[in-house]
Amino acid sequence: MAASTLTEVARLAGVSPATASRVLNGSARTPGPEIAERVRKAAESLGYVPNAQAQGLAKSSSGLIGLIVHDIADPYFSAIARGVQAAAREQRKMLLLATTGGTPEDEQAAAAAFAARRADSIVIAGSRSTRPQDRDGNAGLAAELDRYCRNGGRVGVVGHPVVGAEAPEGYHVVAVPNEDLSAELARELAGNHSGSFVVIGGPEGLLTSDDRIRGFQRGLESAGLAPAEVLRTGFDRAGGYEAGTLLAGRIKAAQATPSGASRPCIFAVNDVMAIGAAAALRSEGLRIPRDAAVAGFDDIETLRDFRPALSTVRLPLEEMGRLAVPAGVGGGPGGDGGTTVSVTGEVMLRRSTQAAAGAPA
Amino acid sequence: MAASTLTEVARLAGVSPATASRVLNGSARTPGPEIAERVRKAAESLGYVPNAQAQGLAKSSSGLIGLIVHDIADPYFSAIARGVQAAAREQRKMLLLATTGGTPEDEQAAAAAFAARRADSIVIAGSRSTRPQDRDGNAGLAAELDRYCRNGGRVGVVGHPVVGAEAPEGYHVVAVPNEDLSAELARELAGNHSGSFVVIGGPEGLLTSDDRIRGFQRGLESAGLAPAEVLRTGFDRAGGYEAGTLLAGRIKAAQATPSGASRPCIFAVNDVMAIGAAAALRSEGLRIPRDAAVAGFDDIETLRDFRPALSTVRLPLEEMGRLAVPAGVGGGPGGDGGTTVSVTGEVMLRRSTQAAAGAPA
DNA sequence: CTGTTAGCGCCTTCAG
DNA sequence: CTGAAGGCGCTAACAG
């Protein structure tokens, strides 16, 4: 990492480093109309590349935005990342990415690393958890983030506020009405489904999952129906597949009895799980929506061409990422401390939950 | 970004900054068994967070790895990103992410930004192009990267070497046998398909696309078949959809003639395009593989549950990302300069290209 | 084993 | 409008 320095450029141009700095970077006005040219040429011929670390040190501001996600290859997070990236670009900042697998410990480590790099802001996405085994981790993460805020950093959160966070100022959360949307989904589903309902949820304590489950049950109740049975598995495709396999067994067993069809409506708390469940049903020889209705949540773009089209709740993922990035220097309207902005989603009823399908051919 | 400094910690602990530095960071041995404790407590109580920028300046090494992709929300890139992230983690470095939309100009800008940040290495993914309008952009990108290498940086490339790059040392490329794999796919497809072949490719000049097209034709030829017609569209889902719509029209027209069925085998040069084409066919009322066989390339994970299962060529995307990261300090076997490592793929024949499907019921 | 002295590369008052 | 001097926070040679 040798590269030439500003001083070398200045020397070659026969000016002081201060002058060189003024013309090469955004100082008030560029000095001497022709001195400037001389400096620029010198820089060019030396292949000068300003050292952002040094600049950052001097100006104490890094031009960095840190993003913490569970897994960048998960389409939910990569969509959010796109939004964050877009916002970062608009603020002329670079994006630092950390993936954690979802454990608060790793999230804390990532936050610490970002703080060390003096990131101007940190965005954290991914469901929070209140599981007992995450207690300590959450506390550590909250402490790290709180300190970061106290030192002037801004943190953006998509979804639930960080568990246990205290710093009043600095946090900016993008709230997602998971519960309400799930309730709405349940109500609409209840309208054209006559069988039982089953929910495939993530582990208990995962806030996003819990909210969606609660909302769904509430929706069912408001439609005058009994609450759905809840199956707990992993919050990913594998979890959905596992639950799907279990359900497939039940459905087939029921179909074998004389009383006949039990056609459940399965709500997986996210699209990826729903797809996993659907795959399991299919590999057991069942068909959707004939033998079971299936719905998900998120409306992942890559899954839109899935057939039968998956009923789900569309979330403006990219927009959520964009909104989660705390405002830049300007500090826009709403200003600092404790900002909360809400997005909204939309229930998308599609083939996967249709009642009477066309001719089975 | 106030935070407390090492000097403050040292003062509070009653030692010199050098000593504090030694205990708080990885120096040879931690000094005095109890002095160390004192320093650590001081740091703790002050909530000290080392300033990585300053450390980087002093050690002239940033601990950063830059990754350049077209679009992080594209599953192809996000899978690679996961691999890069994993490798970065192993090297205990952070990941800087830049998305460019694929234009060489933006890629150059990203490379420059990474160079400015003194990234220890830069990984660039995404098809290179030889289109005329990219000439200047490519030159600029190559110049930027060459300079970066000359200054001691290492660049990793997944896919084709950067067009026009000269610096002999420093480049590390992960080669993908696109052409051979496509040829193999063509041969296997030729084995159980009797109709015509059509290729849906990206714009001419996109190396990855061109390689795959060329390979496919070669495979056809070696199977004694005539070359396939090539449709050029965008290298994304929309492109696939567009071409699919066109083909659907043709297929339906042919089916209407007395001579009867024209059941083409459509090879889209990547999975996302294939899915787009499939969606178009379906929305025109056609079915796969009954009315047309469809194959893609990449074997995107999120698309594995697509039905009918898509025939494609599996690429070890994550592994590619991991391999693209130049070795850390050690410089592993193979050392520096001009490294090239190859990965291999595997043809996956699935439902979407099956010849005589079961009973159409 | 600890403290002192120099910078790393740049920006920013403050004089000239 | 330009140059000189000091410092951002930390590490790395040297002394002691």
Image (tube, coloured by chain):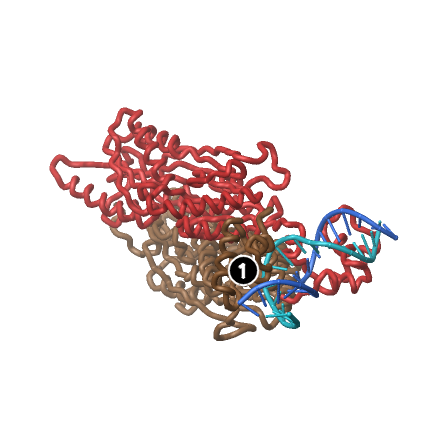
Chain colours: A brown, B red, C cyan, D blue
Q: Chain of mark 1?
A: A
* The C terminus of chain B - image quarter: top left
Report whether B39 appears left or right of A188: right
Quadrant position of residue B347: top left
Q: Position of residue A242 (x, y in %)?
A: 48, 47
Res. A262 visible in picture: no
Quadrant position of residue B359: top left
Q: Position of residue D9 (x, y in %)?
A: 68, 60
Residue at 35 percent across and 36 percent down: it is B212
* The N terminus of chain B - image quarter: bottom right
In this rendering, the count of numbered labels is 1
B280, A123: nearer the viewer:
A123
Which residue corresponds to mark 1? Answer: A65
Q: Is residue A82 above or below residue A156?
A: above
- Secondary structure of the residue carrying tag 1 is strand
B221, A8: nearer the viewer:
A8
Q: Is residue A269 above or below residue A218?
A: above
Residue at 47 percent across and 50 percent down: it is A240
Amino acid tagged 1: Ile
Residue at 15 percent across and 36 percent down: it is B260
Quadrant position of residue B191: top left
Q: Position of residue B181 (x, y in %)?
A: 39, 32
* Disc 1 packing (10 Å; few <14; some 14–19; many ≥20): many
Res. A147 visible in picture: yes
B73, B141: nearer the viewer:
B141
In the rendered image, the residue lying farthest to the bottom is A334
Report whether B199 appears left or right of B76: left
Report whether A134 appears left or right of B315: right
B303, A8: nearer the viewer:
A8
